[in-house]
Amino acid sequence: MKKLILSQFIICACLVSFGQSQKNLVPQHLKSVKADGLLTPGNGTELRDFIPPSGVEMPKPTPTTKMSYTEWIVGESYYDLQTNSTIMNRLAKSGNDRSLAFTYSSEPSGYSDRGTGYNWTNDDFWNDIPLERIESIRTGWPSVLHTTNHEIVISHEFPLQLIMSKSPGIGEENWTEEILEHDIPEGTSWSRAVAGGSDGNSIHMISITIPEATQGVEPGLETEGLDGAILYSRSTDEGETWDIYNTVIPGMDSTAFLGLPVDAYSIFSRGDNVAIAVFNDWADSFVMISADNGDTWGKRILVDFPVDMFEVDESIIDLDEDLLADTLYNTDTSGALFIDSSGETHVMWGHMFYIDDVIGDGQWQYFPYTDGLAYWNASMDDNSWDDVAFVQDADGSGEIELAEDIGTYFLSLTSMPQLAEDGDGNLYASYSGVTEGHQTGTQNYRHLYLLKSEDGGDSWSDPVDATPDLDFIGYECVFPSMAPEVDDFVHILYQRDGEPGLAVQGDLDPPAINEMIYFRITNDLAVEEVVSIDQIKQAQLSAYPNPSTGQFTVNGIAIGVQLQIIDATGRVAQELRLDESKIVDLSGMAPGIYTMSPVGESVGIQLIIE
């Protein structure tokens, strides 16, 4: 596996030369940075020493808003990694019938019962949360799709093969199970599948062969000369037979790539229009488009990586010949793909910068504080995009004020996008973004944001925090999957827990139950109530026991913050710095009512000393 390493913390003004121009390539309000510490999936090292930049121009502040929404807890899982990069279609909607799938496990470690958690509804009330997987064997990474006569879930039995579960209808749950056999020695996993075709009975599926670094065999195995080959399959009869099976599409082959990234791709179909997008790091990011149900394909370049067929860690890229490795732009490997009702293809992805400045160490670097969401459609030039969203300056202070750390997903601060359309042709985008003012004290939470375009993607609304009010202060909202059809509501399935980051990899947080939330929100993105940043900060502060004899454990305030204790007359009775114990000792003070607040802040919490 290619490792990701973060070298000593620096601010980088990343200037990269491209053949085409991009709008606002490097966001001015939050530059890319590298942070101290090794950040390899599974090694448990956290980001640290983050100092938000100041004195730079901010994007237009967006108020934290409360919108009209309803939510249901539709599932639970200890297994909290729903994807490594790009979200598969986990929420399917056919009229009022809705069903969803997610990677389920009831075990806090080992995850031997991992598989597809499934739920459904045909009204406003979802069924009970599932207590077991739908498959008979251990699986993960499910896609759910509706064809004319069936409901189908395709998942993987890592690292061997794919499993197709089929039900006679939505919610009937009388699942049959079939292993999708193949002759690929290294195995194939991390699939995506969608329904399509003019009759609605086609299935379009992609998966990837297991890369050499994951195989554990020498020499490593390749398929058609690719170390990680994305395979395309098509069925025109709801999965009964496959007329195209495990095929490498020209343009995605060894003439253009050494291999393709795991889990960093998406597939979408509407009628006979099909598209496959690949969101790369060290090679071109691109989209393949078919207008004949997958018979033939054309290729468009999203990001033209400056060196073709580059083998990372074998050489240094130095395009400006200054004898230093260049910092290079690409996607963050998480993106969205959509085909609208007119047949136009739309793509979104998170920005990311990369560097490999040491040859032969088996590692390369990415910049975890890269910010920004890119948008492209097929009417635009190749290698050209618009920037549509950034971390929001929620309090309008002119600075992005974050905690000392963020949860680790190996993605941009604004990422995990999804796209959809309503009956009037308006486009909607959702994403998960790091949110100012919502934090544990040491890490900022991610919230779900919505954008809307009423002109086919030429312009987009300001981002609106769809999960902003005081109910969401203590929640991390990630891995959104948005139903492609918007009616009076935008329909989203996402994962929610109380701690930023993951237990399975990255942060290696203690395992805990994660809730799967079906979230339905009005499509007008209207602001019904403004919740101030002071309200948010106030609600985050807590101290216990309270009342006490003078010792309080404080939450909602970062370690190292200078605190002031104000007595009933308004006089500052004491100042102190919150240390790692998070205990404030006021046992030497007279009994009474005091207010504790960070120095310079207008919000505080009442403390009672008995």
Image (spheres, rainbow, N blue to C red):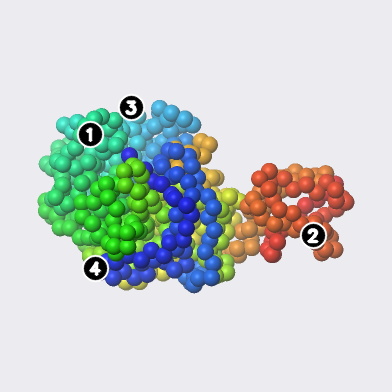
Quarter of the image where one finds residue 352: bottom left
Q: Position of residue 227 (x, y in %)?
A: 22, 41
Which type of secondary structure does the marked residue at label 3 adopt? loop
Marking on residue 220: 1
Separation (CA) of disc 3 from disc 2: 62 Å
Q: Which residue is mark 2?
A: 566
Question: Which of the two labelled residues, at mark 2 and mark 1, occupies the earlier sequence position?
Answer: 1
Q: Position of residue 580 (x, y in %)?
A: 66, 45
Q: Position of residue 528 (x, y in %)?
A: 54, 66
Separation (CA) of disc 2 from disc 1: 66 Å
Nearer to us in this view, 219 or 444:
219
518 shown above or below 239: below
Which type of secondary structure does the marked residue at label 2 adopt? strand
Answer yes or no: is residue 546 visible. Answer: no
In the image, what residue type sits under mark 3?
Ser
Q: Which residue is mark 3?
A: 136
Q: Position of residue 249 (x, y in %)?
A: 15, 48
Nearer to us in this view, 107 or 18:
18
In the image, what residue type sits under mark 1?
Gly
Question: Which of the two labelled residues, at mark 3 and mark 1, occupies the earlier sequence position?
Answer: 3
Question: Which of the two labelled residues, at mark 4 and mark 2, occupies the earlier sequence position?
Answer: 4
Question: Which of the two labelled residues, at mark 3 and mark 2, occupies the earlier sequence position?
Answer: 3
Question: Which of the two labelled residues, at mark 1 and mark 4, occupies the earlier sequence position?
Answer: 4
Separation (CA) of disc 4 from disc 3: 52 Å
Q: How many marks?
A: 4
Which type of secondary structure does the marked residue at label 4 adopt? loop
Answer yes or no: is residue 589 visible. Answer: yes
Separation (CA) of disc 1 from disc 4: 36 Å
Q: Mark 4 and 3 residues: CB-CB less than 8 Å, in contact?
A: no
Q: Which residue is mark 4?
A: 19
The residue lying at 49 percent from left, 31 percent from top is: 108
